[in-house]
Amino acid sequence: MIDTACFIDGRWVAGSGPEMSTTNPSTEEVLGTAASADAGQVSGAIRAAAEAFHGGEWSRVDAKERSVLLHRLAELIERDAEKLQELVAREVGTAVSTAQQQVFGPAGFLHWFADAAVRGPADGLEQHLPLHYEPVTTSSMLLREPAGVVAAITAYNYPLMLCAWKLGPALAAGCSTVLVPSPKALLCTIAFVELVEEAGFPRGAVNLVFGGPAVTEQVVRAPEVDLVSFTGSPAVGTKILEFAAPTLTKVVLELGGKSPNIVLTGADLDATIAGSALRFCLNAGQACGATTRSLVPRAQFDEFVEKSAKYMAGLTVGDALDPASVVGPLISAEHRQNVEGFLSRAVDDGAAVATGGGRPAGLDRGFFLEPTLVTGLANSAELAQEELFAPVGVVVPYDDVEEAIRIANESRFALNANVWGPTPDAIAAARRIRSGTVTVNGGGGRRLDAPWGGPGHSGIGRECGEEGYREFFEVKHVQWPLR
């Protein structure tokens, strides 16, 4: 039992709602059980955040001190990196061999937002406009002020990163927060908030409550909440919009993806194989930006499929804590069953499975699925249009670049994309893809100053970088006559 899993107004408290458990997806063993927050405790967390923002100690912490606190939080994450990597492997199922990104990534973003706290958003906290002369000469300035109380609602797949993406800019701006995590990543979120407490943030700046859908609904509907930042599925994102509508609360949504991976004629095919596969196999494919639709010239289609299948079959699937594992488990039995349903329907519709498609031999416990490559489907097929959140990729042939661009854009999602090929040709293609992010030839390391998000069913607004930071401010126009 986890005795105290809610953090409200600077104190750890036991929930008074239904008990919920978090499970090791590699072993199916229960890692912890805790009582969730009841309605009164959720109200208390919202009230604490509102009081902290409107006149509480947190409202009196200046930008330099906010920066110090955020840098300290990042340093504590770096200090506990090994422990946190193991925790992520146990609770989320990220292979420990690749879990560094789940820890050092969040620390890097927190350092970036710590620096941003001092300077403010790119346009500055105070921006003077040119003089205006009609009907009298006036001067104006724009003031950027913290948005207020932020509801930060996170998914299970990258729990520490999502905490950093939401709390980092919110706290840098001077907002207070109510953090609502997926119960599937409760232990990781508790560990993050424990470091928030150790860093010395004033009470009420960060509050943690968790539970079922009713908890999320109550937080989003609360009139005290000024901004909702949510990461999750489009179906739940739609509900978030409905809950926020009566109070006209601003909403930032980072939702799903069914991202294209285009191999252009002229690309070094061998150089595309590992990068294409790992982009939807790492973290067992549980990533919104996974490029799960590979579009390949028809003349190279068979070669690409054969080499990709051979590479994927060689990826080690196993317990996330085993350093030899590259691909860990899916998050739950229910999720694996859902993915298996997609695959079964695809085969019934004529799809061919080039590799994978089943449960790995010898792994009788845990929610494992083999890295899977599917062919024989049109881009309009269910498996090519729906986000599976699994190590499953689809390969679709095309005849020319025009067709490749058309196929890439035939999706209700527009979060991420990748293009392989001669750099000028790949950049030309990237310009024509409807997507919030496009990498060329694998891109590079994640830039801390770049935004993340996309249009369509991939969401509203942006996270990270200058654009993401700007979401946490309101703009006030002040104008006065010159005499």
Image: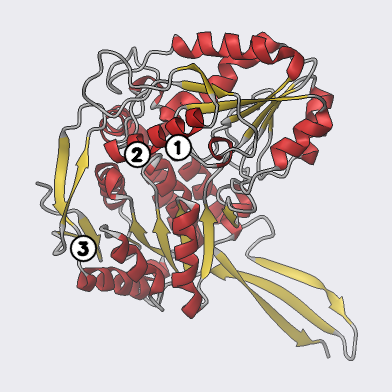
Q: Amino acid at mark 2?
A: His
Disc ID at residue 335:
2
Residue drawn where x is 15% and y is 42% of the image: 32
Instruction: Tell me if I can see residue 172 in this picture.
Output: yes
Label 1 Cα crowd, 10 Å radius (few <14 / some 14-19 / many 20+)? many
Q: Measuring from the top left, give residue 83's x and y in whole percent.
A: 26, 30
Label 2 Cα crowd, 10 Å radius (few <14 / some 14-19 / many 20+)? some
The answer to whether residue 343 is above or below residue 165 is above
Direction from residue 263 to residue 116 in the image, left or right: left
- Number of numbered discs visible in the structure rendering: 3
Q: Which of labels 3 and 1 is toward the front?
A: 1
Q: Secondary structure at mark 1?
A: loop
Residue tagged by mark 3?
37
Q: Measuring from the top left, give residue 445's x and y in whole percent.
A: 58, 28
Question: Where on the picture, by quarter, is residue 125?
Answer: bottom right
User: Looking at the image, do the residues carrying marks 1 and 2 touch, with CB atoms under 8 Å apart?
Assistant: yes
Direction from residue 304 to residue 322 in the image, left or right: left
The answer to whether residue 185 is above or below residue 62 is above
Residue drawn where x is 60% and y is 59% of the image: 470
Q: Which of labels 3 and 2 is toward the front?
A: 2
Residue tagged by mark 1?
389
Q: Measuring from the top left, give residue 179's x and y in whole percent.
A: 35, 58
Question: Where on the picture, by quarter, is residue 143?
Answer: bottom right
Residue drawn where x is 35% and y is 16% of the image: 325
Q: Secondary structure at mark 3?
A: loop
Q: Measuring from the top left, give residue 39's x and y in whole percent.
A: 23, 71
